[in-house]
Amino acid sequence: MQNREQWGSKLGFILAASGSAVGLGNIWKYPHMAGENGGGAFTIVYLICILVVGLPIVIAEFVIGRKTQLSPVGAFETVAPKSNWKWVGMLGVASAFVILSFYGVVGGWTLKYTLISLTGGFSQLAGDPEASGTLFDSFIKGALAPILWQIVFMGFTIFVIVQGVKGGIEKWTKIMMPAILVILVVLMIRGLTLPNGTQALDFLFKPKFEDLTASSIVLALGHSFFTLSLGMGTMITYGSYLRKDQNLLSSALWIIFLDTLIAMMAGVAIFATVFAMGADPGAGPGLIFVVLPTIFPKIVGGAIWGTLFFFLLFMAALTSAISILEVITAYFIDEKGWGREKAIIIFGSVVTVVGAFCSLSMGAFNITSFMDISFFDVLDYLSSKYMLPIGGMLTALFVLYRWGVPNFITEMVLGMDDHNINPAVVRILFMVSAAVVGFILLNEIIATITGTPIIG
Ligand code: PFF
């Protein structure tokens, strides 16, 4: 254990963890979810969920990881030996397999779209959503091309983490995170200076409470886990490479701040462009891959903006995919004594093969066709509606009822200069967080069984 890899600097850790959080969830999912759920109203609920549910669990994961210096399975086993809590860790490793399988597919799409834009391919889509839709559909439904792009994307992921925690993950996120921020600022300014671009601000931030529905609350809650990479031990794993001098509270606040800031900036950049060109903000998941390619060529320098945008999306997806594969890798290193290279090559390949079935399920061959839903959607649905919320809720319950709030606080305050943490407040925060997630899970289960949710 004394050989465990460590982050090189406090900033490196914050950038790596926020790199995990900032991903397709922020730039692809949040804007289209907000677009379909009343903009400002959704944003407000999302922010509340992040603070009430997300913050306590981010901190819990960091504290558990740093305390045990182990990835999730070993971490739960160390604090609660010979109990069933290690299964929460196992659930995390399973979630990592599930999420990375479909995440890698979309990662491949971002690369393909970067290339299309770079080679001027959007120009014949100007103002023509139908042509753009056909291009996107025929690409993702193809058998070979999307799998090849997925393999390239997974190759980048493997390339980075094979180089280790400090020499790979930290080194590359330290380059990519600032690049993501700079590109977003540029795209946001570009969008806001287009005629009518500022309508985006009203749309995203002026809440119209009549638009607030129960289902948008449920959606926002599920999304807060996904966007913060919570409930599957990613933050436990990243926390396990920390020394005791890192202030975990301020680190968690930074990560939440950066994750939220980037989601909002992406929303502004995208909707400013959408409004300026009179496109439909409620276009759903196709907003980015179908609507934007029709808009970019209408803006001066469109090929540049389009390329920057999809490259930004690629980097954001990559820094997240790295963290997901690291959860699997760290499990095999910590628990099975494998070498890093062996774990990454074997499981990077396994995930890529499962991912290929996700990609095929978009059109060519769907192994879950008997369920009337694509394999891709099955994995997405399973992970964001069940696996991550269950993992997150159990993590909160673990701190409350197994580890104990006083022990938790003893570890948490290491690295904090001045602290005055009230155990009762901590207990309440975890209880509220676990209760809210528990209710939403119950709601989802009831909805699945009876067809009518309690809310939503
Ligand atoms: N947070 C990432 C996103 O918003 O795209 C997705 C993700 C990464 C989920 C890592 C879970 C995880 F462990």
Image (spheres, rainbow, N blue to C red):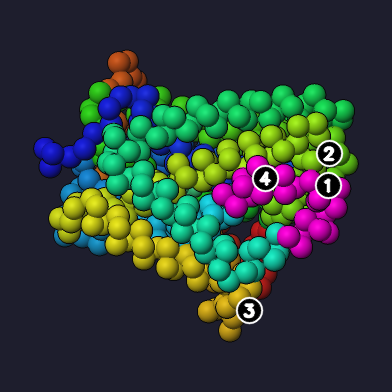
Residue 318 showing in the rendered view: yes
Question: Is residue 134 inside the magenta stretch?
Answer: yes
**Amino acid carrying mark 4 in the image:** Thr
- Single out the mark in the foreground, 3 or 1: 1
Residues under numbered marks 4 and 1 in contact, where contact means CB atoms less than 8 Å apart: no
Q: Which mark is residue 298?
A: 2
Q: Earlier in the sequence, mark 2 or mark 4?
A: 4
Task: Estimate the x, y position of residue 80 in percent, counting from the top left.
Answer: 20, 52
Q: Residues within 10 Å of mark 1 (few under 14, many from 20)?
A: some
**Amino acid carrying mark 3 in the image:** Asp
Q: Earlier in the sequence, mark 4 or mark 1?
A: 4
Q: Residues within 10 Å of mark 3 (few under 14, many from 20)?
A: few
Picture layout, residue 374 above or below residue 86 = below
Picture layout, residue 383 above or below residue 315 = below
- Single out the mark in the foreground, 4 or 1: 4
Q: Which mark is residue 119?
A: 4
**Amino acid carrying mark 1 in the image:** Ala
Instruction: Name the residue carrying label 3.
Output: 372
